Image (spheres, grey):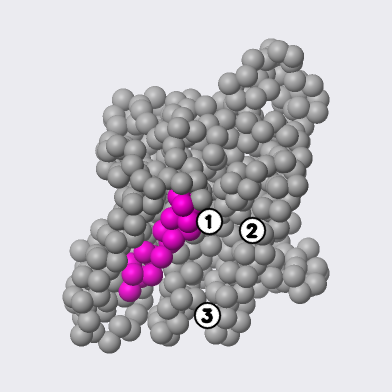
Amino acid sequence: MNRLSFMKNLGLASLAVSLMFLPSMACAVVYWELHMLVVFLLSAFAALFLGGLLYLAGIKADGRLYHRETLALVGVGWLLTAFYGALPYLLSCHMSFVDAYFESMSGFTTTGATVLAHVEVLPKSLLFWRSFTHWLGGLGIILLLIVVLPFLGAGGKLLYRSEIPGLDKSSLRPRIKDSAIILLKIYLILTVAQTILLLVAGMNVFDALCHTFGSLATGGFSTHTKSIAAFNSPLIEAIITIFMMIAGTSFSLLFCLGKGDYKKVLGNVEFRFYVFIIAVSSLLIFINLHTADGPLPNLIGASAEPPPDIWDHMRASIFQTVSVMTTTGFATVDFNMWPEFSRALLVILMFIGGCSGSTGGGIKVVRIFLLFNLAYKHFIHTFNPKNIHIVRVDNLVLPKEHVNALLTYFAIYVLSVAASTLYLAWLNMPLVTSFTAVAACLNNVGPGLELVGATGHYGLVPASGKLLLSFLMAMGRLELYAICVLFIPSFWKRY
């Protein structure tokens, strides 16, 4: 580990991250929240000050990034960025450090879990900040830094490959900076398009921007405690559903779609499996809701009178399936009150997540597809051992080292879920709450079931549990490894 180079680049990243407070400062000026303007100025100064110290500590290094420094910069960079993001909460809401850090990490990792029981009481500029952290974290702070820090050179490519979630590591262009700029352009175009559509649908500018940030980043923070249910608008729900599905699709495929290469998009195995899962799950939940005994609530916190009709069930099933599958976490109903089958299916969808190379979390659709494929090949091998069985994805043969990496990832993932669930249970959290809280945070979904459901929050989780869940959010956002390696002593040894 070249520690001086690591500190120098971490300092540069901190200096660049200090700029992320500027839009919230502008929002504070627009709504004449001068105390929040001071808060954001102090937060930006803290990032500048600490970034300057780190840069000066490593100023003698050449600044080159190799594989170990890259992993450290990604992992520590996200943890440190969440610290900077927690400062506005600490300075304005009288939150504890743990609660502020949890809220900030939830924003940047596009999880959408919150410790706040009522969000409407927050200043407008702080609500904007909550949603804007989604937008920053959705595309990836490291990816944004590649655009503004072109002198990273080869280190930029390593950062890109460490930052982009899933198995889709292919470059859109030979130069990694060009790929980053293309992704950023797609992100900006989608942001403008959804904002305009939400304005046409009846939202004001503030709500339209904040919910666009949450949709495209598959985040889930809303400006209303009742989430999307507060608007009770089928048109708004339809727009957000479409953009959540787009955000859960690989940005490489969106680039191909923009070029008119429809054949590549429709022929992509992962995309077809992604659409298939959403369609089948929506249908199954719709059937379960429509045939369930007893009344179901229409909206979050609303009574069951009048009882929902077939259209209400269709709206709810499609929206919540897409919201959970893409790990967004927006809600139009209290799905914690749904029948057991529907709740169980939503929990399964939490683990699947979006496509590789998307802003969605979870295991990723392509990994689920490959795990099924591997299980099937191994099953066939038990009675036909002489044949050679290979695993393909889009006519590409998966090398043995990729198979081993997939199985290793899955093993670490399962162990993380099991150990974390046991720890929350040790803290006397109910079992369903513990398991779904871990699932929702590790997969960057947000709401779970029972105490942390759509109408609940994470404020009741003990402080040590919130810290654990914060690390799980970062692990899920960074595909486990960039956070896990930070706790291995040999990783920090000098070479």
SS class of the residue under badge 3? helix
SS class of the residue under badge 1? helix
SS class of the residue under badge 2? helix
| Front residue of 120 and 244 | 120
Q: Quadrant of the N terminus?
A: bottom left
Callouts 2 and 3 close, C-beta under 8 Å:
no
**Mark 1 or mark 3, which has the lower sequence index?**
1
Verify whether residue 20 appears in magenta.
yes
Spatial CA distance of label 1 from label 3 is 20 Å
Residue 74, quarter of the rendered image: bottom left
Tell me where residue 345 appears, x and y as whole percent: 62, 35
Tell me where residue 195 appears, x and y as whole percent: 67, 53
Verify whether residue 80 appears in magenta.
no
Amino acid of disc 1: Trp
Q: Which residue is mark 2?
A: 191
Q: Which mark is residue 177?
A: 3
Q: Residues within 10 Å of mark 2 (few under 14, many from 20)?
A: many
Please indicate whether residue 112 sits to the left or right of residue 196 in the image.
Answer: left
Foreground mark, 1 or 3?
Answer: 1
Q: Is residue 486 above or below residue 195?
A: below
Q: Which residues are magenta?
A: 12-29
Amino acid of disc 3: Lys
Amino acid of disc 2: Thr
Tell me where residue 493 appears, x and y as whole percent: 19, 72
Q: Is residue 33 above or below residue 317?
A: below
Chief SS of the magenta region: helix
Q: Residue at x 62, y 64 (%)?
A: 188
Please indicate whether residue 17 sits to the left or right of residue 54 in the image.
Answer: right
Q: Which residue is mark 1?
A: 135
Callouts 1 and 2 close, C-beta under 8 Å:
yes
Q: Quadrant of the C terminus?
A: bottom left
Tell me where residue 281 appears, x and y as whole percent: 70, 39
